[in-house]
């Protein structure tokens, strides 16, 4: 795994997510560009690099977001670990698997984050929050084909499958 | 018999040890005091703020350009008509300015407001970043402690409340919007004089808290800030009532409020410092 392209992609994602994301919003549906990166690295790298990459991704999201510093890095390391542990029983090279896994784990991550916010502030309205979580997760997973193609081009020299034996 | 001693390089190679170490670091960060974690965040993000500003600036330029192109394409046939209208309005404006000048002089002598708010200063700032989390609503502006901004300063746009400053660094500040789940603002319904609390819920709308069942709110009622608590200036427009429901058995009404300021449509704000 090459770290320089990873940090370049992480930097670009952080910049886009924190400045231009409203260009591609559909009402409450805001894509989370960090999460596909977590899924991508959980699919292609070994456990240790996966954990480090996801930790940096979470920390980067924490830096540009208000709230508890470190919470996203914990969630991303945990999500990355669970995806890594089940990847051998999945057709992880298939696009549908990538989209579905991103959607399912994005919903789980967002629900956990919403619980955290709800405990902290007691203000979230359950049906509205659920609608936001589902729409955001769906939008994020819809972007997976494009994002995985970009990550594949930048992070891997030989495409998705040659790394499988790593 | 040979005994093995724990080797640090082996520990680094162990993936589980790496995960545990990373989680321990994250947990340590999580339990830091809010002031310290905010300071770490602002310091780490400071080198990226100029790039955020540049990206936002370019994005706004592009957006304005596209808006212009589209509006030119749509409104060419109305251009002449509007130009005539503008000339008429300009003439009227000159008349009005004279009247306003006279009235201002009267107001200055009559009102004590000017005296009370002598220390108030307005600082203009551009929006350079948005919160990366879907469930939080904050923005970053390109004015900080160098410009005289302090935490808890009030942020407005088009004379309506946008939010308050939560953290400040040298050249940038984070603004907690009124739609953020952590935001609670004392407010008042203009029409009924009912006292309410406006709270954010991570959507583009706010909710009113503690509106009694018997309060006669209706769609279109205006909500303004209240000076109760001494934190917010009074009479700053916050939003308008969009819908209100009263369910059987509930003590309070459920009221949805549309904020006056659409944050995705504005590029700059004013910070009221005191």
Image: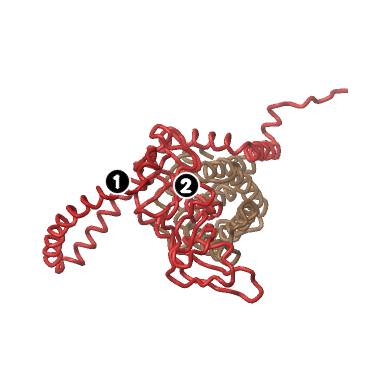
Chain colours: A brown, B red
Q: Residue furthest right?
A: B1
In the rendered image, the quadrant that contains the N terminus of chain B is: top right
Instruction: Pinpoint the chain carrying mark 1.
Output: B
**Which label number is shown at residue B109?**
1
Q: Quadrant of residue A47?
A: top right
Q: Which residue is found at the position 26% from the left and 50% from the top?
A: B106
User: Dot 2 corresponds to which residue?
Assistant: B164
Residue B115 in percent (x, y) is at 37, 41
Residue lying furthest bottom in this view? B248
Counting from the top left corner in percent of width and height, residue B88 is at 12, 62
Q: Choose mark 1 or mark 2, whichever is in front.
A: 1
Q: Residues within 10 Å of mark 1 (few under 14, many from 20)?
A: few
Q: Earlier in the sequence, mark 1 or mark 2?
A: 1
State how far apart marks 1 and 2 are (Cα): 31 Å
Q: Nearer the viewer, residue A29 or B181?
A: B181
In this rendering, would A14 be left or right of B82?
right
Residue at x-position 11% and y-position 60%: B87
x and y, in percent, of residue A37 in the image: 52, 49
């Amino acid at each position: 795994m090459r770290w320089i392209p990873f940090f370049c992609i992480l930097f670009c994602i952080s910049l886009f997510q924190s400045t231009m994301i409203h260009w591609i919003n559909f009402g409450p549906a805001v894509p989370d560009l960090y999460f596909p990166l977590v899924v991508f690295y959980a699919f292609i790298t070994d456990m240790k690099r996966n954990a480090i990459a996801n930790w940096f991704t979470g920390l980067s999201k924490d830096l540009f977001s208000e709230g508890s510093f470190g919470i996203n890095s914990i969630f991303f390391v945990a999500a990355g670990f669970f995806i890594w542990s089940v990847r051998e029983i999945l057709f992880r090279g298939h696009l549908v698997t990538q989209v579905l896994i991103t959607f399912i784990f994005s919903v789980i991550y967002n629900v956990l984050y919403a619980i955290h916010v709800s405990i902290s502030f007691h203000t979230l309205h359950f049906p509205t929050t659920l609608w936001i979580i589902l729409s955001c997760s769906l939008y994020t997973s819809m972007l997976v084909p494009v994002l995985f193609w970009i990550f594949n081009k930048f992070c891997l020299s030989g495409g998705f499958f040659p790394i499988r034996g790593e | 018999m040979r005994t093995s001693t724990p080797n640090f390089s082996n520990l680094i190679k162990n993936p589980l040890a790496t995960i545990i170490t990373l989680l321990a670091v994250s947990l340590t960060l999580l339990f830091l005091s809010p002031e310290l974690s905010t300071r770490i965040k602002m310091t780490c993000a400071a080198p990226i703020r100029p790039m955020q500003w540049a990206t936002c600036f370019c994005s706004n330029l592009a957006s304005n350009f596209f808006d212009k192109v589209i509006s030119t394409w749509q409104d060419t046939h109305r251009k002449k008509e509007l130009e005539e209208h503008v000339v008429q309005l300009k003439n009227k404006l000159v008349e009005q300015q004279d009247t306003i000048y006279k009235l201002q002089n009267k107001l200055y002598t009559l009102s004590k407001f000017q005296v009370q708010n002598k220390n108030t200063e307005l600082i203009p700032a551009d929006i350079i970043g948005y919160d990366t989390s879907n469930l939080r609503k904050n923005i970053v502006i390109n004015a900080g402690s160098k410009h005289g901004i302090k935490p808890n300063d009030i942020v407005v746009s088009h004379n309506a409340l946008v939010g308050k400053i939560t953290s400040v660094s040298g050249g940038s500040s984070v603004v907690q919007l009124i739609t953020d789940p952590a935001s609670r603002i004392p407010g008042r319904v203009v029409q009924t004089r009912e006292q309410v609390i406006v709270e954010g819920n991570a959507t583009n709308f706010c909710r009113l808290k503690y509106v009694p069942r018997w309060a006669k709110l209706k769609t279109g009622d205006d909500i303004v800030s209240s000076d109760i608590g001494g934190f917010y200036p009074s009479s700053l427009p916050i939003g308008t009532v969009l819908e209100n429901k009263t369910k059987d058995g509930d003590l309070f009404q459920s009221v949805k409020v549309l904020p006056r300021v659409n944050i995705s449509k504005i590029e700059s704000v004013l910070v009221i410092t005191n």
